[in-house]
């Protein structure tokens, strides 16, 4: 999956240091990221590429994290760059453009970029928020409100019955891939309760014997995913589709189950686990 970057090691501790020439500079404009022009490989600009750029950390130049000994920083102001050497590209390239450890760094940085971009002012009193020098936190100098990066818990559910798995397609999306039932956890709800509610809401089925598989940080949607396999509790011919969420839902044997070509997501890995007879 996208976070599996071994032998590289991700360090998310907030330990801001002054960037060096080889430190990576991440700049985003909505869903676009600044990258070096390079065929068939992902490469971010380094501070050495911008010798005139100030390196003093501030609300406009933010330390993000490190991978191994490489440090990553977020630039809030657009750096002047030579279009023949650099370009703005869609963050969709983080799904399949090697190397994988930079894909993970890029989409994680984008999640933090979105959080900083939407938390400029205090939600309680409206004052500008100030960056903490001790932790990854924003605080209000007036009312004392503290803001930390937000993570949204959600579930992925592989429903199995008679050696078949239920797969669905989302409604109103350009993607034509089949996926598994999924949804976000609501306030006051356990992850297990989310599994049962989402399955019933989306396809009108009940499940039992929930088995936790594994989790995944999915920064494309700012989500922490919890994967479960479950058994159908009832008949498999009683699907009631929520057409606002899904366009179709069908049962597939291990041979028939359409697997995604990219193995960066928890959904894809779970489908392959089923196809290979491992669940």
Image (spheres, helix red, strand yellow):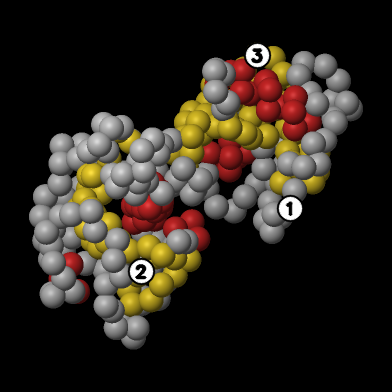
Q: Which residue is mark 2?
A: 34
Q: Earlier in the sequence, mark 1 or mark 3?
A: 1
Q: Residue at x 67, y 42 (%)?
A: 179
Q: Nearer the viewer, mark 1 or mark 3?
A: 1
Residue 87 screen position, x and y as percent: 38, 76
Q: Nearer the viewer, mark 3 or mark 2?
A: 2
Q: Residue at x 75, y 24 (%)?
A: 200
Q: Residue at x 58, y 26 (%)?
A: 186
Q: From the viewer's perspective, tell me whether residue 22 is left or right of residue 3.
A: left
Residue 38 screen position, x and y as percent: 36, 75
Q: From the viewer's perspective, tell me whether residue 171 is left or right of residue 57.
A: right
Looking at the rendering, which quadrant does residue 75 occupy? bottom left
Q: Which residue is mark 1?
A: 172
Q: Earlier in the sequence, mark 3 or mark 2?
A: 2
Tell me if label 1 and label 2 are in contact, CB under 8 Å. Answer: no
Above or below, 227 against 1 in this view is above
Q: Is residue 101 visible?
A: no
Q: Gap in Å between the C-alphas at discs 1 and 3? A: 32 Å
Q: Residues within 10 Å of mark 2 (few under 14, many from 20)?
A: many
Instruction: Between residue 200 and residue 187, name the one nearer to us.
Output: 187
- Dot 1: what SS? loop
- Dot 3: what SS? strand
Residue 268 screen position, x and y as percent: 58, 43
Residue 127 screen position, x and y as percent: 31, 44
Q: Which residue is mark 3?
A: 209
């Amino acid at each position: 999956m996208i976070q599996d970057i071994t032998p590289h090691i991700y360090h998310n501790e907030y330990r801001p240091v002054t960037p060096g020439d080889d430190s990576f500079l991440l700049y985003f404009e909505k869903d676009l990221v600044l990258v070096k022009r390079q065929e068939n490989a992902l490469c971010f600009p380094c501070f050495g590429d911008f010798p005139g750029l100030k390196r003093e950390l501030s609300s406009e130049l933010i330390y993000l994290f490190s991978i191994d000994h490489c440090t990553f920083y977020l630039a809030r102001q657009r750096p002047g760059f030579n279009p023949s050497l650099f370009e703005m590209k869609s963050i969709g390239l983080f799904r399949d453009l090697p190397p994988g450890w930079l894909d993970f760094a890029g989409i994680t940085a984008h999640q933090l970029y979105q959080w900083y971009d939407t938390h400029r002012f205090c939600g309680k009193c409206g004052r500008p928020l100030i960056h903490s020098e001790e932790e990854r936190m924003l605080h209000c100098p007036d009312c004392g409100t503290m803001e930390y990066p937000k993570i949204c818990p959600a579930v992925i559910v592989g429903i199995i019955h008679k050696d078949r798995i239920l797969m669905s397609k989302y409604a109103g999306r350009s993607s034509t891939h089949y996926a598994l039932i999924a949804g976000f956890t609501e306030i006051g709800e356990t992850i297990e309760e989310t599994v049962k509610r989402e399955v019933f809401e989306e396809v009108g089925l009940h499940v039992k014997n929930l088995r936790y598989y594994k989790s995944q940080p999915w920064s494309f949607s700012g989500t922490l995913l919890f994967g479960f396999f479950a058994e159908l509790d009832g008949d498999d011919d009683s699907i009631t589709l929520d057409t606002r969420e899904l366009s179709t839902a069908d049962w597939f044997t291990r041979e028939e189950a359409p697997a995604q070509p990219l193995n960066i997501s928890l959904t894809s890995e779970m489908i392959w686990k089923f196809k290979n007879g491992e669940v």
